[in-house]
Image (cartoon, rainbow, N blue to C red):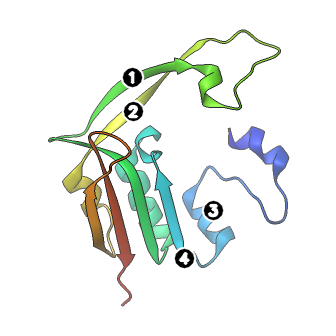
Amino acid sequence: MVYRASELATDQLMFFDDVEKAADWLGSIDLIHSNGAIQYVDDPIGTVKALCAAARAAKMVWYRVPISDGAAKAEVQTSLLSDNGPGQMPTAKDKLVKYERHWISESAFVAAHEGYCSTEQGPDPRERGSQQFSFARIDS
């Protein structure tokens, strides 16, 4: 996806497949905002740890984080390809696509925010079973 998106890159818009490279390019980051996305990466906890270590945003806000009752678990979701983009597919037949969605352990998610303190946490009204979180960087 990064390779395809790189066709759109400009001096002010870049695409990366590595958190550290993106953080280096961005410089100082005020806010990382995620809404219903972290559960679709291969390693949600590892990604959060990488963002905390490399990006060092002043604040991190997470919406629609699916929290498991215990250990992390995964499920396979299915949707139409056209539901994952601009809609109409004029040159191809629509088809079903499958992708993994991770349910994340709450304690592991909170602990992954090394160097941050929790400022808000609670049920996310946008999605059943999900939580919303806010963290602020602890400056030393």
Kindly identify the amino acid type of the residue bearing the numbered disc 2. Answer: Arg
Image quadrant where one finds the N terminus: top right
In this figure, which residue is indicated by the disc labeled 3?
A: 22
In this figure, which residue is indicated by the disc labeled 4?
A: 30
First reached walking from the N terminus: tag 4 or tag 3: 3
Quarter-of-image position of residue 89: top right
In this figure, which residue is indicated by the disc labeled 1?
A: 76
Q: CA distance from mark 2 to mark 4?
A: 28 Å
Q: Are marks 2 and 4 in contact (CB under 8 Å)?
A: no
- Residue at x-position 71% and y-position 32%: 86
Q: Are marks 2 and 1 in contact (CB under 8 Å)?
A: yes
Badge 3 element: helix
Q: Does residue 88 lie above or below 2 as drawn?
A: above
Q: Would you call the spot at circle 4 few (<14 residues within 10 Å), some (14-19), or many (20 or more)?
A: few
Q: CA distance from mark 4 to mark 3?
A: 14 Å
Q: Does residue 37 lie above or below 77 as drawn?
A: below
